[in-house]
Amino acid sequence: MIQVSNTSRGDDNIKVAKHVLTMSLIEINELLEVANARKDDLTKKALRIGAVVKFGRPNGAKRTGTIEKINISKAIINVDFKRWSVPISMLEVINT
C-alpha cells in the first residue's frame, strides 16, 4: 500500500515514484487498476451536458465544443453549430 506523509505535494510525488520503482509486476498491475478506476470516475463526473470538451486525433488538430447529449459509448458535441458524435474515450474535459 502506498503511504504518504503530511509533507508538501512534491515530496509526496517523489515518495510515490520511488515506491513504484520497488514494486513487483503484480503490485503495479493492481495500482494501475485502482488508478484507472479513479480516472474513469472523475471523467464520468466531469462529463455533463453543457460541459466544454476537446476532441480530435492524438497528434492532430483538436476541436472544442459543448456536450449536447451523452449516450452509452458516444456523446453528441456541438462545435460551431455542427454536431459531432464522438466516442467518450476521446473527450478531454476543459477546466474553465
Image: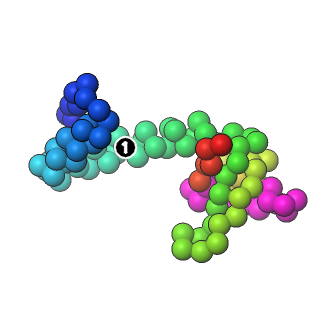
Q: Quadrant of the C terminus?
A: top right
Residue behind mark 1: 35
Asked whether 51 or 40 is in front, the reply is 51
Tell me which residue sits at (46%, 43%) in the image.
Answer: 39
The location of residue 51, given as percent across then percent down, is: 71, 43
Considering only vertical position in the picture, is 87 above or below 2? below
Q: Does the magenta-highlighted stretch encompass residue 46?
A: no
Q: Is residue 82 visible?
A: yes
Tell me which residue sits at (42%, 41%) in the image.
Answer: 37
Q: Is residue 55 left or right of residue 1?
A: right
- Among all residues in the image, which is located at the extreme bottom? 60
Asked whether 30 or 65 is in front, the reply is 65
The location of residue 16, given as percent across then percent down, is: 23, 42
Q: What crowding class fits label 1: few (fewer than 14 Cα within 10 Å), some (14-19), or many (20 or more)?
A: few
Q: Quadrant of the N terminus?
A: top left
Tell me which residue sits at (74%, 55%) in the image.
Answer: 65
Q: Amino acid at mark 1?
A: Ala
The location of residue 58, given as percent across then percent down, is: 54, 69
Q: Is residue 70 visible?
A: no
Q: Is residue 49 left or right of residue 19?
A: right
Disc 1 on helix, strand or loop? helix
How many marks overall? 1
The location of residue 87, given as percent across then percent down, is: 63, 58
Q: Is residue 65 left or right of residue 89?
A: right
- Among all residues in the image, which is located at the extreme right? 81
Image coloring type:
rainbow
Tell me which residue sits at (21%, 31%) in the image.
Answer: 3
Considering only vertical position in the picture, is 24 above or below 45? below
Asked whether 41 or 3 is in front, the reply is 3
Magenta segment, which residues? 78-91
